[in-house]
Image (tube, rainbow, N blue to C red):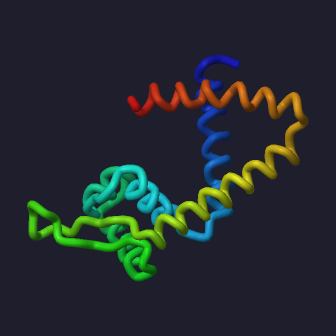
């Protein structure tokens, strides 16, 4: 397999894996992503969240509205710009995110144990650091 074919196969396979794992979520992908950004990065505006997610402001605002309505996020006036609201994850939101993450991990763990024999599981363990390095090279983080 040449380099271009490897890159395309990896892109397709990881995309399918991500979609399959997200299908196990009870939250929409947008809501889960916003809670994740607020959990990892602290308070953000809706515009910040839209930029981080690579979606329109309207799409982010729709997800934020749902999260606010469910009590998973709270808003407060921006300290330096009164026209903006700063969004924070609530304890309820953090608990929900933790449950979602655990559910995804359990689902993926079950799939790994079911689909792969012990030698393949060990091979997969060796691939994770490579995928992490590849991700860092792409994202610069």
Residue 74, located in which quarter of the rendered image? bottom left
Residue at the top extreme of this rendering: 2
Could you tell whether 14 is left or right of 133 in the image? right
Residue at the front extreme of this rendering: 91
Nearest to the observer: residue 108 or residue 89: 89
Say if 105 sits above or below 34 in the image. Answer: above
Residue occupying the point 37% across, 77% down: 68
Residue at the right extreme of this rendering: 117
Q: Quadrant of the C terminus?
A: top left
Residue occupying the point 43% across, 73% down: 72
Number of numbered discs on residues: 0
Residue occupying the point 54% across, 68% down: 96
Residue occupying the point 61% across, 24% down: 130
Could you tell whether 29 is left or right of 108 in the image? left
Rendering coords of residue 62 (x, y %): 37, 73
Rendering coords of residue 9 (x, y %): 66, 33
Nearest to the observer: residue 101 or residue 54: 101
Say if 137 sits above or below 76 in the image. Answer: above
Rendering coords of residue 111 (x, y %): 80, 50
Q: Quadrant of the N terminus?
A: top right
Could you tell whether 133 is left or right of 40 in the image? right
Say if 94 sits above or below 48 in the image. Answer: below
Nearest to the observer: residue 60 or residue 42: 42
Residue 125, located in which quarter of the rendered image? top right
Could you tell whether 111 is left or right of 88 in the image? right
Residue at the bottom extreme of this rendering: 69
């Amino acid at each position: 397999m040449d380099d271009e074919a490897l890159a395309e196969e990896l892109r397709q396979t990881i995309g399918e894996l991500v979609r399959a794992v997200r299908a196990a979520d009870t939250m929409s992908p947008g809501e889960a992503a916003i809670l994740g950004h607020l959990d990892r990065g602290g308070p953000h505006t809706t515009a910040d969240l839209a930029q981080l997610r690579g979606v329109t402001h309207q799409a982010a605002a729709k997800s934020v509205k749902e999260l606010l309505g469910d009590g998973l996020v709270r808003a407060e006036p921006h300290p330096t710009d009164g026209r903006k609201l700063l969004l924070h994850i609530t304890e309820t939101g953090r608990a929900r995110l933790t449950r979602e993450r655990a559910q995804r991990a359990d689902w993926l763990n079950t799939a790994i144990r079911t689909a792969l024999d012990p030698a393949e599981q060990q091979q997969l363990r060796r691939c994770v650091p490579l995928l992490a390095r590849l991700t860092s090279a792409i994202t610069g983080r």
